[in-house]
Image (cartoon, rainbow, N blue to C red):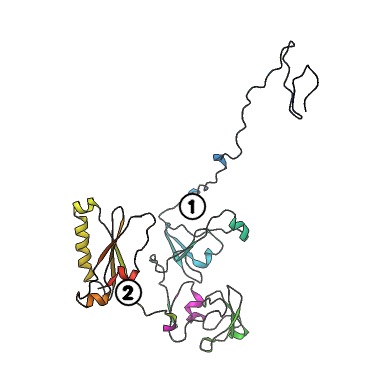
């Protein structure tokens, strides 16, 4: 829609009028206006940063002595801080540590920042001076008592009810009947009378000896896969020859039936495929020989053969 007056230039409906010049001249054309700063730019002052620790909380060489139950509801000591933790019913941070010391209240709040929460488990962590070793519970005859619903193991946080004949799981809240061989009467305070004889009810970390039904297969030595550099520099410097010589001397020290494999690499991966053990035992009567398979994609490699063809017993 344009104006019918000859004094004003045509304008679109809703468009602002250009200011008129002083002295009756032509209207002034609007000049370039400064663009406002984008609201999507990151303000460095708004980036969260860890707060500086006070001098009293700084990492020192002084050993901190604490009990594991005292850590419930508080931040554990730093992973590199010297501390001595006595297990009185809660797992020490030496064996179990989370990547987050504080959790958000709801599941939706945990999903919003997309920050994963993980747990670092180190069951064979070395002990600090003064710490008690992990107790071993012999449950090799019947197995340790477990929750019938979530299969949680017996631990210091379960609750015994019905005179000790039932325990309530601390994880799922389900009630499970206590096995006959594990039953014990409760004292006036509701605690089992044999609690001092049950490390699994006193300690946050313990080791169970279980029957063979707990094993998916017979125990075996873990297979060993050696990665050896085979670049031109490694060959010229003698590093490859020394590595092969050391590996050959180690094979005589390994336990019987240990499975060993070798993978060499430069700018690609070289898989050394060996004949099946029955072919090797036949003494070369078959045409099948060892093969060298090259995987040129070192960023996203793939295994070209089943693992049984890449390792062999010694």
Tell me if residue 45 can be seen: yes
148 up-or-down from 246: above or below: below
Label placed on residue 117: none
Give the percent coordinates (x, y) of residue 63: 42, 59
In the displayed orientation, state which residue is furthest to the top.
23
Residue 200 among magenta residues: yes
Q: Secondary structure at mark 1?
A: helix
Residue located 50% across and 67% down the image: 68
Please name the residue that numbered disc 2 is placed on: 221
Q: Residues within 10 Å of mark 2 (few under 14, many from 20)?
A: few
Q: Is residue 256 visible?
A: no
Q: Quadrant of the N terminus?
A: top right
Check the picture and name the quadrant holding the C terminus. Answer: bottom left
- The mark lying in front, picked from 1 and 2, is 2
Q: Residue at x 26, y 75 (%)?
A: 277
Residue 57, numbered label: 1
Q: Judge left or right: residue 95 versus residue 234.
A: right
In front here: 95 or 24? 24
Q: Position of residue 289 (x, y in %)?
A: 23, 69
Q: Which residues are magenta?
A: 189-213
Indicate whether 290 appears above or below 299: below
């Amino acid at each position: 829609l344009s104006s019918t007056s000859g004094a004003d230039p045509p304008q679109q409906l809703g468009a602002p009028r250009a200011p008129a010049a002083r002295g009756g001249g032509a209207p002034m054309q609007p000049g370039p206006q400064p663009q406002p700063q984008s609201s999507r730019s990151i303000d460095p002052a708004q980036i969260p940063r860890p707060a500086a620790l006070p001098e009293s909380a700084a990492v020192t060489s002084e050993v901190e002595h604490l009990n594991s139950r005292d850590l419930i509801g508080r931040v554990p000591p730093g992973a590199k801080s010297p501390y001595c933790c006595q297990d009185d019913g809660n797992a020490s941070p030496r064996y179990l540590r989370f990547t987050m010391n504080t959790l958000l209240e709801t599941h939706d709040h945990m999903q919003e920042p997309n920050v994963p929460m993980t747990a670092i488990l180190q069951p064979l962590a070395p002990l600090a001076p003064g710490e008690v070793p992990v107790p071993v519970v012999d449950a090799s005859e019947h197995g340790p008592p477990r929750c019938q619903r979530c299969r949680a193991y017996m631990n210091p946080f379960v609750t015994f009810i019905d005179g000790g004949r039932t325990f309530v799981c601390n994880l799922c809240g389900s009630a499970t009947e206590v096995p006959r061989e594990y039953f014990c009467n409760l004292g006036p305070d509701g605690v089992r009378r044999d609690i001092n004889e049950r490390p699994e009810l006193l300690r946050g970390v313990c080791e169970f000896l279980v029957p063979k039904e707990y094993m998916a297969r017979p125990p075996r030595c873990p297979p060993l896969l050696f990665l050896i550099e085979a670049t031109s520099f490694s060959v010229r410097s003698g590093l490859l020859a020394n590595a092969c010589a050391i590996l050959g001397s180690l094979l005589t020290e390994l336990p019987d039936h240990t499975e060993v494999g070798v993978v060499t690499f430069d700018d690609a991966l070289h898989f050394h495929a060996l004949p099946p053990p029955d072919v090797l035992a036949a003494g070369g009567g078959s045409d099948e020989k060892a093969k060298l398979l090259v995987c040129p994609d070192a960023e996203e490699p793939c295994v070209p053969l089943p693992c049984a063809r890449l390792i062999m017993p010694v």
